[in-house]
Image: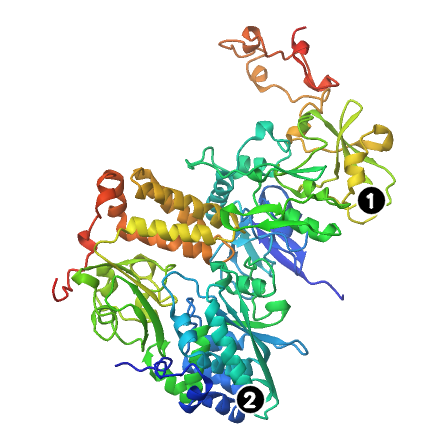
């Protein structure tokens, strides 16, 4: 291709130049931060994904330099390409915020909200989404739709009740594994991800559907209920693998490997490998290599400070100054009651993250 | 008597067979178009006629045809949308069942105009017997040299194939139809690209309704300008209306869009008045997706003008006090019908037919159905009405395809015009189980049919 034409696009009053053919969402990701619309179904590495969840809706207040008319409807930013001079409103548009809150409510009415027992909790996109864009309660007063749990072979469990039908796993199986054996059956709110008739999913790259699932609908059976993700420590590691890139993230507790996943970028998508190839990993690396000796550790993964996974990972770092003593001349505010002195349960002196195994009641009885 | 173009010969004995149809002047449009006109001239003629899509949206057909991309070496396709699944609409069924050759003739002319050598009729699976009728008609046309290679020695090749759907309302949406035609799951595609650029198998495609394509025949026979003289304003030509509900003579009527709604309902020529001498309560003038109108707004617009059966007049006043022509499914309600129950029925339909691709429609339609069922059964709360309004406003416009809108509009219109009936259901839960709210102020005070 000859010289690339650059389009100027303004998102929430921030202007960025992107090549023609870029989507609004990709342009917003280039800016980063708050102006990036959330995306539940779009996955930049999966062709054809996106447009379904409607969480990335944005308002186009000016179509382009040539045709400055605004678009009448909110558009899905993941599938709308930018035009030169386009002006987009995301966080600055009350209409978008309202519609997005609506979508979050819709997504949650049939979601079981069983986060306390869900393995995805802590790295769940739906949790982030509802925390950031949802309202505090739901107005839904009816029974939620439920499905039975299904075992898709020895590695993957499907818990359809949690699914938000983003179709990512369908695209993933279609595009990165040799053969797709599952898809969407039925339609409407009784649509489900399923194999027909109950088949096992086993081909070499099928484990990646767990990584692309934004919620806890597809879970790793070798990790289920073993640990909460925020108690494990992610480290980057690699091994020589002739099927995949072999570059993974290990989730450790002490020197026990609890889980192996592909490396993810800041948008929760699988990163490209260092040799420029795709970062998808094979089932062998993901499910079978659970010994530390199998891997060469590169170092800790950089975890976003705001993630719950970062909790307790920064012990020993300089803490920010306490505001209260600073403005109260060294005194602390008087508490009505010190919860730690009256509670038998809460023991702040015990650091759970320093335990090398799951916490046990005996740990609190010291 | 209004002008009849499509159904003028529908009642001739044996018109379904080729011989009778040809004897009655059939396939003249093909002869005229292929022998004396260029494809562009046909498109031009359709443009001049002002024909608007009869499937519901009312988009000018000539304009749609001129949008089709014409890249070198890529075949183009015409697809006929016979997936008529809108509750209340059965005009295409009537047309295909009684006068199938009219559709085939329209298809040949349109295929010639668009350069489509392989044309498809996507028909809903429930119309199983019509598939046989159409296939027989295609076979007869082929034997008589109207289809196949080198038609009439002009060098134009055309084949028509009938493809059955599997019974999904969503496959009437043009991109879902194309997906289904390709053999995939019928999920609507995200536009753009529009089918005119990338349609079936990524080739430029035009999707048109059965009635639209059939109307091409009289346009060629009469000439576009002559056709445009029928009707009024931008509503040109004739329109098939499938009337049903509480009327004396339900059925398919061809109107020339100059008669008033009142005349259509009460005249002997058309619906013949409300059944059992009852009074008119409400009406859905264009198929289940369009807003319902109470009688007083149906017969007269908000400005007090008479409402006519055409695109402009029916949508006069926007959604606040108007409705839409839609696909022409004219559903009439008498004073004994319950709007809450009716709205629930529609909500159930849209919940069942939502493809489940985008979240507002997938989750919202089910939620609305549950709330409406609760209201109908007398367990509702006052806040449910506002909640329904809020849900529909969050579905409308936020989905990939118009099914979300189609699910939201009937609910919105029912609450807009019949809020007092919803409230009555909440306040009188027991009474609502045994009797209907009645007519109240939205009943038609002007028209008292004889015998009432």
Q: Residue at image x 59%, y 92%?
A: B154
Question: Residue A366, relative to residue A119: is it above or below?
Answer: above
B434 vs B390, left or right, is left
List x then y, in percent, for residue B15. 40, 83
Q: Is residue A269 visible?
A: no
User: Of A192 and A240, which appears nearest the observer?
Assistant: A192
Per the image, the residue denoted by label 2 is: B145
Q: Disc 2 to disc 1, how far (Cα)?
A: 62 Å
User: Of B177 and A325, which appears nearest the observer?
Assistant: B177
Find residue B266 and name its label. none
Quadrant of the drawing holding the C terminus of chain B: bottom left
Badge nearest the viewer, 2 or 1: 2
List x then y, in percent, for residue A362. 67, 9
Quadrant of the drawing holding the N terminus of chain B: bottom left
Q: Secondary structure at mark 2?
A: loop
- Circles 2 and 1, Cβ within 8 Å, touching? The answer is no
Q: Residue at image x 59%, y 64%?
A: B193
- Chain of the residue that carries numbered disc 1 in the rendered image: A
């Amino acid at each position: 291709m000859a010289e690339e034409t650059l389009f100027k696009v303004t998102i929430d009053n921030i202007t960025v130049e992107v090549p023609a053919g870029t989507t609004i969402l990709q342009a917003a990701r280039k800016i980063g931060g708050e102006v990036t619309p959330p995306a539940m179904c779009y996955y930049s590495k999966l062709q054809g994904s996106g447009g379904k969840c409607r969480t990335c809706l944005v308002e186009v207040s000016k179509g382009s330099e040539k045709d400055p008319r605004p678009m009448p409807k909110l558009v899905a930013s993941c599938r709308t390409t930018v035009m030169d001079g386009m002006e987009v409103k995301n966080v600055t548009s009350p209409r978008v915020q309202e519609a997005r809150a609506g979508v979050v409510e819709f997504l949650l009415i049939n979601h079981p909200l069983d986060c306390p027992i869900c393995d995805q909790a802590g790295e769940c996109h739906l949790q982030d989404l509802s925390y950031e864009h949802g309202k505090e309660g739901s107005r839904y007063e009816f029974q939620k739709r439920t499905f039975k749990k299904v075992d898709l072979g020895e590695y993957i469990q499907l818990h359809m009740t949690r699914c938000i039908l983003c179709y990512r796993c369908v695209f993933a199986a279609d595009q990165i594994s040799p053969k797709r054996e599952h898809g969407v059956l039925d339609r409407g709110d009784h649509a489900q991800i399923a194999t027909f008739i109950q088949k096992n999913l086993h081909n070499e790259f099928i484990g990646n559907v767990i990584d692309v699932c934004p919620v806890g609908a597809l879970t790793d059976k070798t990790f289920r209920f073993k640990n909460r993700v925020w108690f494990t420590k992610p480290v980057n590691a690699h091994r020589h693998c002739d099927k995949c890139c072999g570059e993974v993230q290990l989730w450790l507790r002490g020197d026990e490997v609890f889980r192996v996943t592909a490396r993810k970028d800041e948008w929760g998508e699988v990163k490209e490998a260092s040799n420029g190839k795709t970062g998808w990993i094979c089932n062998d690396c993901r499910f079978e290599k659970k010994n530390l000796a199998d891997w060469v550790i590169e170092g800790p993964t950089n975890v976003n400070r705001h993630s719950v996974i970062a909790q307790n990972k920064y012990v020993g770092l300089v803490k920010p100054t306490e505001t209260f003593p600073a403005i109260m001349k060294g005194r602390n505010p008087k508490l009505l009651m010190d919860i730690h002195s009256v509670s038998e349960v809460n023991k702040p002196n015990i650091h759970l993250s320093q335990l090398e195994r799951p916490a046990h009641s005996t740990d609190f009885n010291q | 008597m209004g002008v009849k173009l499509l159904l003028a010969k529908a009642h001739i004995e044996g018109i379904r067979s080729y011989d009778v149809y040809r004897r009655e002047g059939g396939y003249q449009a093909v002869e005229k178009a292929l022998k004396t006109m260029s494809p562009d001239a046909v498109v031009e003629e359709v443009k001049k006629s002002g024909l608007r899509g009869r499937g519901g949206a009312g988009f000018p057909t000539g304009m749609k045809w001129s949008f089709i991309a014409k890249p070198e070496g890529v075949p183009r396709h015409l697809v006929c949308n016979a997936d008529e699944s809108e509750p209340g609409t059965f005009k295409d069924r009537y047309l295909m069942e009684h006068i199938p050759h009219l559709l085939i003739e329209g298809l040949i002319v349109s295929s010639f105009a668009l350069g489509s050598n392989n044309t498809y009729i996507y028909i809903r699976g429930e119309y199983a017997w019509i598939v046989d009728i159409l296939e027989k008609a295609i076979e007869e046309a082929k034997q008589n040299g109207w289809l196949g290679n080198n038609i009439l020695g002009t060098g134009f090749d055309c084949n028509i194939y009938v493809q059955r759907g599997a019974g999904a309302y969503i496959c009437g949406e043009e991109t879902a139809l194309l997906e289904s035609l390709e053999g995939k799951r019928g999920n609507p595609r995200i536009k753009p690209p529009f089918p005119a650029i990338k349609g079936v198998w990524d080739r430029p495609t035009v999707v048109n309704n059965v009635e639209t394509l059939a109307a091409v025949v009289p346009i060629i026979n009469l000439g576009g300008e002559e056709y445009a003289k029928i009707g009024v304003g931008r509503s040109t030509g004739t329109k098939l209306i499938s009337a049903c509900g509480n009327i004396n003579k339900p059925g398919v009527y061809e109107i020339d869009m100059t008669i008033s709604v009142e005349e259509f309902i009460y005249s002997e020529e058309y619906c013949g008045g409300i059944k059992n001498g009852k009074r008119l309560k409400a009406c859905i003038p264009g198929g289940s997706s369009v807003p319902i109108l109470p009688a007083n707004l149906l017969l007269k617009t908000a400005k007090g003008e008479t409402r006519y059966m055409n695109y402009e007049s029916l949508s006069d006043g926007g959604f606040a006090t108007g409705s839409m022509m839609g696909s022409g499914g004219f559903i009439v309600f008498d004073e004994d019908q319950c709007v809450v129950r009716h709205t629930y029925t529609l909500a159930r339909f849209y919940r069942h037919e939502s493809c489940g691709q985008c979240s507002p429609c997938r989750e919202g339609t089910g939620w609305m159905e549950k709330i409406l069922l609760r209201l109908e059964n007398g367990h509702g709360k006052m806040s449910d009405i506002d909640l329904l309004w809020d849900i529909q406003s969050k579905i409308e416009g936020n989905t990939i395809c118009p099914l979300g809108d189609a699910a939201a509009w009937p609910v919105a219109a029912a609450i807009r015009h019949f809020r007092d009936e919803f409230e009555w259901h909440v306040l009188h839960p027991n009474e609502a189980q045994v009797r209907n709210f009645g007519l109240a102020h939205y009943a038609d005070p002007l028209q008292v049919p004889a015998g009432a």
